[in-house]
Amino acid sequence: MPAGATYDCIATTTLGSAQATVTFSSISGDYTDLLITGQIKGTQNAALLLRVGNGSVDTGSNYSVTTFAARYNQGSVDVASERYSSITSIYASGSTWYSGTNFGTLQMNLANYSNTTTNKTIITRLDTVENANYCGPSAVVGLWRSTSAINIVTFSNNGGNFDVGSTFSLYGIKAA
Amino acid sequence: MALTYTAIATTTVGAGGAANITFSSIPATYTDLLVMVSARNDAAVTNGLVRLQPNGNTTTSVYSLTYLIGTGSAAAGASEIPTTNYCWSYCPADSATASTFGNSYYYIPNYTSSNNKPISADGTMENNATGSRMNLSAFLYSSTAAITSITLVTANNDTGASANFKQYSTATLYGIKNTV
């Protein structure tokens, strides 16, 4: 991964109180790719959901995902790949739930996010470790079937809240 | 815009190899850390491990993980709570295809916090034969101390015995600052 001035931090938020959604809006189209990183914790055992859009978040059935994950399940670990088409959000199959002071890690890549010719592909790694069901590493490929540029992204915790201390950072990456 | 990704230190293993790679005196001025590794070890097997120890901590009970691995013929997952391998990813060992090094990365958000530290890692052990492996791993380092040093050691994947990094192995520590 290259270092230096090609990575700009566009926005960052650390939650001082639990909240249902985290949104980055008015994202500049000046970059080549976007990277979203963070440490996250939910107030319940739930999946991380992502919706994107142009001007406003798309809540229609315009997303699809393919997941690959290892999930803790009552003392053992299940390995699974799942596929969902025409759904209303991209979800990372790992759980955001964490007990005590523990957080999970998030890394999300939105390549060529501002082009107006192609649908948008998003790759996510969400990792959590705990003796709790659905926790584990996950890799998710999501598709937003729109040729509009992405200038808004919204995260939610599938009906729960993101807990205090959760941090989301949005970086813009410029090609050389 | 502020500079967000900074290479804090980089190491290339010289002739004769090295038992470990250590990044010490890591400044607390960043938000997250990223360690990028290209490694091969001298164990007389095909598969090796790179082990990451924050603050040089060798107390295995503080490391937990759930991982997903692929071997080219099967996918598997398991939890080690705790693990005896610290934070790990695969790398080629001495019996793997010559001149082949395995890439891995370790992402450590909020490394100065007083919470336990989650660590995300991906690794590869590529080999022009069967026996290649990759891992996607979720770690928890159960320590509330800020991370001020990182030690990388390497091992025989089959026995767990310590090994040496081969010449030309490299590791780079990046600091990530989320200052807008």
Image (cartoon, coloured by chain):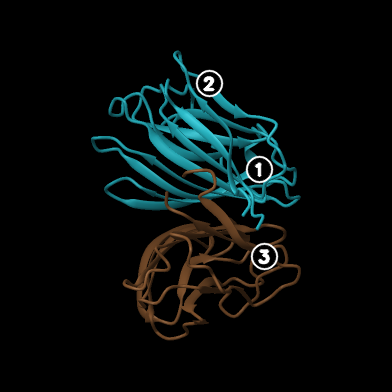
Chain colours: A brown, B cyan
Taking A144 as reference, is B153 above or below it? above
Number of numbered callouts drawn? 3
Q: Is residue B130 above or below residue B144?
A: above
Q: What amino acid is labelled 1 in the image?
A: Val
Tell me if residue B34 comes above or below residue B21 in the rendering: below
Instruction: Provide the secondary structure element on which disc 1 rests.
Output: helix
Name the disc covering residue B62, or none: 1
- Quarter of the figure with residue A116: bottom left
At which x and y percent is residue A148? 39, 77
Disc 3 to disc 2, C-alpha distance: 40 Å
Query: Of residues B76 and B144, which is closer to you in this image?
Result: B144
N-terminal-most mark, 1 or 2: 2
Residue depth check, mark 1 versus mark 2: number of the one nearer the observer: 2
In this rendering, the label closer to the viewer, 1 or 3: 3
Q: Disc 1 to disc 2, how far (Cα)?
A: 22 Å
Q: Which residue is mark 2?
A: B19
Q: Measuring from the top left, give residue A13's x and y in whole percent.
A: 67, 65
Give the labeled residue for mark 3: A13
Q: Position of residue B179 (x, y in %)?
A: 67, 55
Residue that appears at 39% across and 35% down: B102
Q: Chain letter of disc 3?
A: A
